[in-house]
Amino acid sequence: MSIHPFGAVTVLSPVLMTWLLARGTGKPLLERGIAKHRPAYADYVRRTSGFLPLPPKRG
């Protein structure tokens, strides 16, 4: 069984894009900009999930 190069790109591209949005330039930059203008936003970020609709954390 051989892996076609385009098959690898099909898998790696969404993984890279998700990483960039979650950890790279997307979400962190947006949250930093909002936190400057809304101090309570940092608490909201700490309690909620970034991408998955999970129940809020307590505390």
Image (cartoon, rainbow, N blue to C red):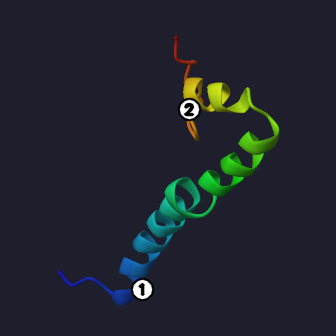
Task: Identify the image quadrant of residue 49.
Answer: top right
Indicate the quadrant containing the N terminus: top left, top right, bottom left or bottom right: bottom left
Question: Could you say which disc has been placed on residue 6 in the image?
Answer: 1
Can you give x and y, in whole percent of width and height, for residue 12 in the image? Answer: 41, 72
Q: Is residue 55 left or right of residue 35?
A: left
* Residue 4 pos. (x, y %): 32, 86
| Residue 36 position within the rendered picture, expressed as x and y whole percent measured from the top left | 76, 44
- Residue 33 against residue 45 in the figure, above or below: below
Question: Within 10 angstroms of label 2, few (less than 14), some, or many (20 or more) residues?
Answer: few
Residue at the image position 48 percent from the left and 60 percent from the top: 19
The disc, 2 or 1, on the residue closer to the chain's N-terminal end is: 1
Q: How many marks?
A: 2
Find the residue positioned furthest to the top.
59
Q: Which label was assigned to residue 49?
A: 2
Q: Amino acid at mark 1?
A: Phe
Q: Is residue 27 left or right of residue 36?
A: left
* Label 1 neighbour load within 10 Å: few <14, some 14-19, many 20+: few
Distance, label 2 to label 1, CA atoms, is: 33 Å
Determine whether, in the image, residue 49 is placed left or right of residue 12: right
Residue 52 percent across, percent down from the top left: 56, 36
Question: Which mark, by number, is residue 59?
Answer: none
